[in-house]
Amino acid sequence: MPTPRTEHRAKIAEARNVLGEVISRARYADEPTILVNRGKEAAVIVSHPFYEQALRDRALIEQLTAMAGLPEGVSAEERPDLVHTARILYEALAKAERDVNAARNVSES
């Protein structure tokens, strides 16, 4: 099981006073800081490599989600193999999402 990621929380005004420290934690220790505004999570300061990976992950998920549907103009009767593949892909994406959410809930408690 992976080691839980250390996260910091700070009100925006407090983080502003120690911005250099917040950036250093993100950059060198790979520890994000969640910025809170009026009790609600507003933003997160993360390292640039983490941000780039998040963009790549998001693009991949969007591409896989798009692939999970049948191509436009193709009926299920014409391509039962695509229906089967799409169902497997959709179920795998749904399971991965549940796993990520479960891991997130465990780390938050």
Image: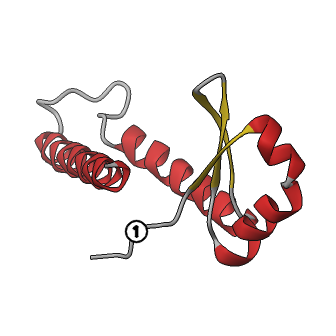
Image point 81% across, 64% down: which residue? 21
Tell whether 62 sits left or right of 10. left
Q: Position of residue 26 (x, y in %)?
A: 71, 65
Q: Position of residue 97 (x, y in %)?
A: 30, 46
Residue toward you, 12 or 26: 12
Residue toward you, 20 or 1: 20
Image point 79% across, 47% down: which residue? 15
Tell whether 37 sits left or right of 3. right
Q: Secondary structure at mark 1?
A: loop
Image point 40% across, 68% down: which residue? 4
In the picture, residue 83 is in which quadrant? top left
* Total count of labels: 1
> According to the image, label 1 marks what residue?
4
Tell whether 72 sits left or right of 35. left
Name the amino acid, label 1.
Pro
Position of residue 41 relative to residue 82, above or below, is: above
Q: Position of residue 95 (x, y in %)?
A: 20, 49
Q: Quadrant of the N terminus?
A: bottom left
